[in-house]
Image (cartoon, rainbow, N blue to C red):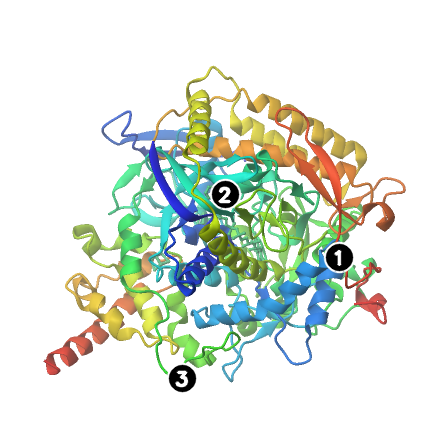
Amino acid sequence: MNRDEFDIVIVGGGGAGLRTAIAAAEKAKAEGRQQRIALISKIYPMRSHTVAAEGGAAAVTDEGDSYQAHFDDTVSGGDWLCDQGVVDYFVHNTYRELAQLERWGCPWSRRPDGSIQVRRFGGMKTARTWFAADKSGFHMLHTLFQTSMQYPEIERLDEYYVTDLAVENQQVHGLIALCVATGEMHVIGAKAVILATGGAGRLFRFNTNAGTVTGDGMAMAYRHGVALRDMEFVQYHPTGLPGSGVLITEASRGEGGILLNKDGYRYLQDYGLGPETPLGEPKNKYMELGPRDKLSQAFWQEQQAGRTGKLGDSDVVYLDLRHLGKDYILERLPFICELAKAFVNVDPIKEPIPIRPAVHYTMGGIETNGQCETSIQGLYAAGECASVGLHGANRLGSNSLSELLVFGRLAGESASDLASERSAPSKAVLEQQAQQQLDLIHQLKQGDGSENWVALRKEMVKAMESGCGIYREEAGMQAALNTIRALRQRYKNVKLEDSSESYNTDLLQCLEVGCSLDIAEASCLAALERRESRGAHQRLDEGLQKRDDVNFLKHSQVFYQGDANATITWQDVDVRFSAPAERVYGDAAKGAHS
Amino acid sequence: MSQTKSIRVQRYLPEQEPEPFWQNYEVPFDESTSILDALNYIKDELDNTLSYRWSCRMAICGSCGVMVNGIPKLGCKTFLREYGTRVDISALAHFPVERDLVVDMDIFMEHLEAVKPYIIDKSKGRPTGESDTYRQTPAQMARYHQFSNCINCGLCYAACPQFGLNNQFLGPAAITLAQRYNLDNRDKGKRERMAALSEHDGVWSCTFVGFCSTVCPKHVDPAAAVNQGKIEAAKYTLINLLNG
Ligand SMILES: Cc1cc2nc3c(=O)[nH]c(=O)nc-3n(C[C@H](O)[C@H](O)[C@H](O)COP(=O)(O)OP(=O)(O)OC[C@H]3O[C@@H](n4cnc5c(N)ncnc54)[C@H](O)[C@@H]3O)c2cc1C
Ligand code: SF4
Ligand code: FES
């Protein structure tokens, strides 16, 4: 076993983790503190799934836009389940973060005069999304990663898999990590730990997420008693490629792409998003620029009515870009062309792209307050793994990349402050936790179990897809919950085929499935107990098809209970600025709030 | 998926066997099955012990580089439909193999860091306020933009004979990254970067084979960057000579 101690340890090298690390380093420097900072990631930082974000990052930018407008779009987009103090902080701080990234070299797309160009995005009242062609996340991540190399105080542990936190009496003391290359256990003490481990899209079979997006950090915090909040809200992105689930960015609609059913009809006008906007004149909050939950739901309705087409065994609708013309498409959406050609053999300049909804984003996560602090002292969370209260029941596209920066910075600065005051971590707590992890891994490798994680994962993703889809029903959710609970029991009996030390991906994937199963239970339980329809959580059950503010203007909080069933409680939402109103788009929104 | 293809994977399990060996697997496929899909099928259905890297499966994270029939390829963007009866998959050439298809990328990461890949600007006029930005016209951006599209997959290193002979050579991606910043109008750090580029193991090691650009899955054209780097390095060396 290898032992080390840092002041601040960040788990995750995606956008959130890197921004946190740089902020902590700068804060330490500004305050004249000598602090050791570790950045731990199970894959090289520039491989993190932030790299796949295509569309862009939102901030109030142009004259005529306002903080109030971004606030209103976010809060109504989240169906009033956002914590409004948090949203207010967010909208006021996004611009400075995107500007900072510009000064660090991010190649944001520009206007002819050299100023920042913004594009339209779904559910946003006006164009306010900064973008770098259709590789915004890629350029943001590489800019952050390369910039981080200037800070010698950031020590990277690349390809280290964190298996558990060391916690006692609601105090964090550090964590336990496995060096993937050697298989050696590392016991890492820390005064502050920030989880920036990303979402959990891989709970579902059909998704736009990388194979590594398995919710590990959520499971770690949850197992130590932190609530997972709002886990029932899972965003389906309306435009994934059939088969693979690879994402076709919303920016393709922001730039003017239209959605057609198999009859070539722009069906969105039948779902409260009309009237039809003229070709080549996309209009914010109308038609194709409605919010994701509404668009995915409209797909489901069309599918039920038999108006979808087929590609292989997938039901599909069509995203048509042809009227934008070759030059514009190649300038604004080059990656989309590359992906459509490779994965469905379609050239978007000549043919509409077949698409279907796919699981995309985890709105819920590790509960934190507006300062990114969890209920465990010294433990923070930021980015997609966290539930800071920004997204409510439905995240608006392009708010997430901005979130990584705004809250990553906040978490990093606070962690530096806290670490300068906290006493050294307890070695006893760390050793005890490490021993537990060693025993667990020994059991997986040498025990006499008979289950294989591949089978468990297959059953999990199938159960989640059928029980917690775009529309949900009591019986389906209950069945999914039962299945997940049974799978959790079976997981205790898992055995690996591979007992080697170096690059044992059999072990890593098995540990990931364990994490996914725990949080899948939280997701199913919260879905079942939220007896209303709101944002991404839509029920078909009689009497539950509408939002119910009397009983459910509340965050769900699920608590881990070890082998026993998880439990749920409810928490008030901060609605200090804007009282819940009806959520409307298209012409119906004229004169309405927002 | 009624058809199947026979795939050979070069295994290396140093904890069990001292030497690498080839293993055959029978994999079902259709028009859309990628090399990565095939590896995932093998891992899930046939052999849990196979190890390889992957993450995004959409040709952007740069994890999944392997040799397919001896040519460096991105596993997720290369499809079984492109091959006949022979499909041999092995670890990226020129890097030490850790296990199976996993190579040691440390030297690659060191080369990237060596070129100071970040904006260096200590000029008086630089934007410093919290909300300030530089101006950069589309034409200014076009000068470096292609070079900023590198996904760090390492295929060009597996294609580079010089790196194969001497892994101290900075290599195509690191030189491209240096040029990406050198050509950015926001950057004033070229002189600092040129030291690494002008050294013996910098641009001069390249004998211009150009295979790096052929295999690059992102059309970054690292060979062009290396060539530009040579011209810059020549200028730098000359100026240093003149300044004595
Ligand atoms: C295809 C796609 C397109 C998107 N496009 C947009 C967009 O245009 N605009 C927008 O705002 N949002 C977009 N999103 C959402 C946004 O990209 C993500 O929410 C965001 O990038 C998540 O960043 P993160 O830093 O929280 O996590 P990630 O980037 O996923 O990073 C997670 C990190 O945690 C590490 N990690 C995880 N578990 C462990 C462990 N056990 N041990 C050690 N390390 C661990 C990983 O190695 C990784 O470094 C998109 C999402 C997808 C999937
Ligand atoms: S230049 Fe091309 S081949 Fe080389 S690492 Fe970058 S993307 Fe890969
Ligand atoms: S898996 Fe990311 S590039 Fe292939």
Is A283 left or right of A99, judged from the image as shown? right
Image quadrant containing the N terminus of chain B: top right
Q: Can residue B137 be seen in this view?
A: yes
Q: Which mark is residue A212?
A: 2
| Chain letter of disc 3 in the image | B
- Say few, some or many: other residues with alpha carbon within 10 Å of mark 1 (under 14 / 14 to 19 / 20 or more): few
As displayed, is residue A581 above or below residue A157?
A: below
Q: Is residue B42 visible?
A: no
Q: Which residue is disc 1 drawn over? A: A263
Which quarter of the frame holds ligand 2?
A: bottom left
Instruction: Return the disc, 2 or 1, that comes first in the chain's sequence.
Output: 2
Residue A530 % position (x, y):
78, 41
Label 2 near ligand 1 (CB < 8 Å) = yes
Residue A133 % position (x, y):
52, 68
Distance in Å between CA atoms under marks 3 and 1:
58 Å
Secondary structure of the residue carrying tag 3 is loop
Evaluate if marks 3 and 1 touch, with contact meaning CB atoms under 8 Å apart.
Answer: no
As displayed, is residue A363 above or below residue B127?
A: above
The residue that appears at 71% across and 32% down in the rendered structure is A567
Image quadrant containing the C terminus of chain B: bottom left
Q: Which residue is disc 3 drawn over? A: B125
Tag 2: residue type?
A: Thr
| Chain letter of disc 2 in the image | A
Badges 3 and 1, same chain: no
Tag 1: residue type?
A: Asp
